[in-house]
Image: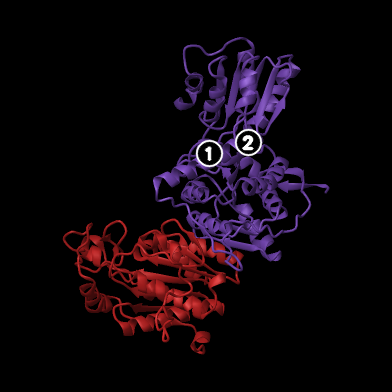
Chain colours: A red, B purple
């Protein structure tokens, strides 16, 4: 077998060889890959420590070729705080879903951001609890059917979705807070750039950084992968507008 | 080092610093807040980590994260705050990383009060977080002993990759006593072969409490159990007073043990042959020494600042061979030596409880308090 002469796509160095357990069509794989590419490009794989959450990405530590710890549900920002404070020259990131970050871990994420912890958070918003089988999350859209809102989320009794990026951007400790989407190649490229900026924020000591990624959950949404991407574009993007909610002055000068 | 007058909570804080504490995470709660306050000044001046967390939940998970890097790390709290930390403790135990937690116990249940109590004994020794997990629990009875055990708790936690808790009641945290501090230990690079501190020139590491395959979780539990057997074989600590010729033995830990010592000394002055056993490790518990004593004394009197929690452990070791009496104060009340002395008089007069759980008999004697 001859070596390919024009290799355009391969597994990033920051990945292990372990195949992921994610459902077909789920965008976790895309988000993982973008992080892996950024860690490789920044040449920080060997000094990165990841913090996995509880949720679908509970096994994220199996896929990244970096040191990893696994947090209790919602507590990843607290664990990351402990690690980063002791080892300030390491790159520390958490990877959290909406149930983990915006529900049970609301206290930890808000205070990590308020303290300006120099950590990076990748926040996967797919509007439901994936691992437990598709229950209503704090980010579930009004009217959206889940296994615990079978008639659709009724805002009168079940409240309204929480817009995390907007909320966290009000805190002065934050350096970089943006929302991106993974529903098409253009947005995926923008998401990667944002993830790079988030890690650059940390590498430069510019405070707390978070990238919220609108993501799909074909299995629990009961849709095909393509329908799911469409759903993100048509329903989630209007409810969770994409954009830069906080970019610190120092960061605006950074070109990557 | 000369003896100085130290407040218990501040002494614990300084002793931890001198034992090489690298990171502290805590939350204010009476009666332990002076530890947090002291370290908020002391840690930064030494270039070490201090974070006041937003809750005890966050504090214990910061401890968890820092512990995963192999740093010497601790948190401190008081009863309701320690309840909040139980989730984190279970994860720390399941991940097999070393961490130190101090509980300056107060009256409960619920919000209770801020007076000294020992009613978290079962939580610390037998219960707490979910899952099968062992933990070392030390119970000092003076400021000096708290200082000495503080250094030991880091060594034990690291040696066995286990939680080491220091439980003391609020009075030890709050009172001032002359005590001697150890020398300042330098912070050493310990380079544990399990720590997740960045995979520089080595294979990457994962620290987790997940064993998704039940057979693997069973093996993990058996591994923890085996390590616990080592702890039981090597780390039991207790103090004996007047046991050589004792006809019966008072058992008490922490402040209750200390108050009992005054009572036992007074009894001895009257010619009553009472002795005292004061467990220092309440986990692992000194079952063996009680087992041996049960073979030669006429009975025991357990005294605690709770409703009779350690009592069960004494009874377990005695195995019904001789009577085990109980005298407790609870809800933040501290017994006077005279109260224990009058129990000693009752026993010396041969008035052992019969036909009734001695804790029920004690409750009957306490019933007048309910009438007030």
Q: Which residue is mark 1?
A: B225
Q: Nearer the viewer, mark 2 or mark 1?
A: 1
Residue A181 in which image quadrant = bottom left
> In the picture provided, is B87 more to the left or to the right than A241?
right
Q: Percent x, y for residue A145? A: 19, 63
Q: Which residue is mark 2?
A: B281
Residue A210 in view of the camera: no
Q: Are marks 2 and 1 in contact (CB under 8 Å)?
A: no
Q: Mark 2: few, some, or many residues within 10 Å (few <14, many ≥20)?
A: many
* B172 or B60: nearer the viewer: B60
- Give the farthest residue toward the left: A151
Q: Percent x, y for residue B319? A: 54, 19
Q: In what quadrant of the picture does the N terminus of chain A appear? A: bottom left
Q: Percent x, y for residue A22? A: 33, 64
Q: Report in which chain the residue with disc 2 lies.
A: B
Q: Percent x, y for residue A72? A: 44, 56
> In the picture provided, is A233 more to the left or to the right than B20?
left
> In the picture provided, is B243 more to the left or to the right than A183?
right
- Give the farthest residue toward the top: B350
- At mark 2, the secondary structure is strand
Q: Mark 1: few, some, or many residues within 10 Å (few <14, many ≥20)?
A: some
Q: Residue at x 65, y 49 (%)?
A: B154
Q: Tell me the distance, in whole angstroms, between the alpha carbons under discs 2 and 1.
A: 18 Å
Residue A245 in which image quadrant = bottom left
Q: Report in which chain the residue with disc 1 lies.
A: B
Q: Give the mark, 2 or 1, whose residue is nearer the N terminus.
A: 1
Q: Residue at x 68, y 24 (%)?
A: B276
- Report the disc number at residue A65: none
């Amino acid at each position: 077998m001859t070596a390919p002469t024009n290799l355009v796509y391969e597994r990033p160095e920051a990945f292990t060889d372990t195949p992921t357990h994610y459902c077909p069509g789920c965008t976790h794989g895309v988000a993982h890959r973008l992080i892996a590419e950024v860690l490789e490009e920044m040449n920080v794989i060997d000094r990165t420590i990841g913090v996995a959450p509880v949720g679908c990405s509970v096994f994220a530590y199996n896929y990244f070729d970096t040191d990893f710890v696994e947090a209790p549900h919602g507590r990843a920002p607290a664990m990351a705080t402990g690690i980063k404070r002791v080892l300030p020259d390491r790159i520390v990131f958490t990877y959290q879903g909406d149930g983990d970050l915006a529900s049970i871990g609301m206290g930890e994420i808000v205070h990590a951001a308020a303290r300006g912890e120099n950590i990076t958070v990748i926040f996967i918003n797919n509007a439901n609890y994936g691992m437990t089988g598709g229950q209503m999350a704090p980010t579930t859209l009004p009217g959206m059917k889940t296994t615990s809102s079978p008639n659709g989320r009724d805002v009168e009794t079940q409240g309204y979705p929480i817009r995390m990026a907007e909320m966290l951007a009000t805190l002065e400790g934050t350096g970089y807070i943006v929302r991106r989407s993974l529903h098409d190649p253009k947005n995926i490229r923008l998401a990667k750039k944002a993830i790079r900026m988030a890690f650059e924020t940390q590498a430069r000591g510019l405070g707390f950084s978070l990238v919220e990624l609108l993501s799909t959950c074909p299995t629990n949404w009961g849709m095909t992968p393509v329908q799911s991407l469409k759903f993100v574009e048509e329903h989630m993007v209007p409810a969770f507008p994409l954009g830069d909610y906080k970019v610190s002055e120092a960061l605006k000068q950074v070109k990557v | 080092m000369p003896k100085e007058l130290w407040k218990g909570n501040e002494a614990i804080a300084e002793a931890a610093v001198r034992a090489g504490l690298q990171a502290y995470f805590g939350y204010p709660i009476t009666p332990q807040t002076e530890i947090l306050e002291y370290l908020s000044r002391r840690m930064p001046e030494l270039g070490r980590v201090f974070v006041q967390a937003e809750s005890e939940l966050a504090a214990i998970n910061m401890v968890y994260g820092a512990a995963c890097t192999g740093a010497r790390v601790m948190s401190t709290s008081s009863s309701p705050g320690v309840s909040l930390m139980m989730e984190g403790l279970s994860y720390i135990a399941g991940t097999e990383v070393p961490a130190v937690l101090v509980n300056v116990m107060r009256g409960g249940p619920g919000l209770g009060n801020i007076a000294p109590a020992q009613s978290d004994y079962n939580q610390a020794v037998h219960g707490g977080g979910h899952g099968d997990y062992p933990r070392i629990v030390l119970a000092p009875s003076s400021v000096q002993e708290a200082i000495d055990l503080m250094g030991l708790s880091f060594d034990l936690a690291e040696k066995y990759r286990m939680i080491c808790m220091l439980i003391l009641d609020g009075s030890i945290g709050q009172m001032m006593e002359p005590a001697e501090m150890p020398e300042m230990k330098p912070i050493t690079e310990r380079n544990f072969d399990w720590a997740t501190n960045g995979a520089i020139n080595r294979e990457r590491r994962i620290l987790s409490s997940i064993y998704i395959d039940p057979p693997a979780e069973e093996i993990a539990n058996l591994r923890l159990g085996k390590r616990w057997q080592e702890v039981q074989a090597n780390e039991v600590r207790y103090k004996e007073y007047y046991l050589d010729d004792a006809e019966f033995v008072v058992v008490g830990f922490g402040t209750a043990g200390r108050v009992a010592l005054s009572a036992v000394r007074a009894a001895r002055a009257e010619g009553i042959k009472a002795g005292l056993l004061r467990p220092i490790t309440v986990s692992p518990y000194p079952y063996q020494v009680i087992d041996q004593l049960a073979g030669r004394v006429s009975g025991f009197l357990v005294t605690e600042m709770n409703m009779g929690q350690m009592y069960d452990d004494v009874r377990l070791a005695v195995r019904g061979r001789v009577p085990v009496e109980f005298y407790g104060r609870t809800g933040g009340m501290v017994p006077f030596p005279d109260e224990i002395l009058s129990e000693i008089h009752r026993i010396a007069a041969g008035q052992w409880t019969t036909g009734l759980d001695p804790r029920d008999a004690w409750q009957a004697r306490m019933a007048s308090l309910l009438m007030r």
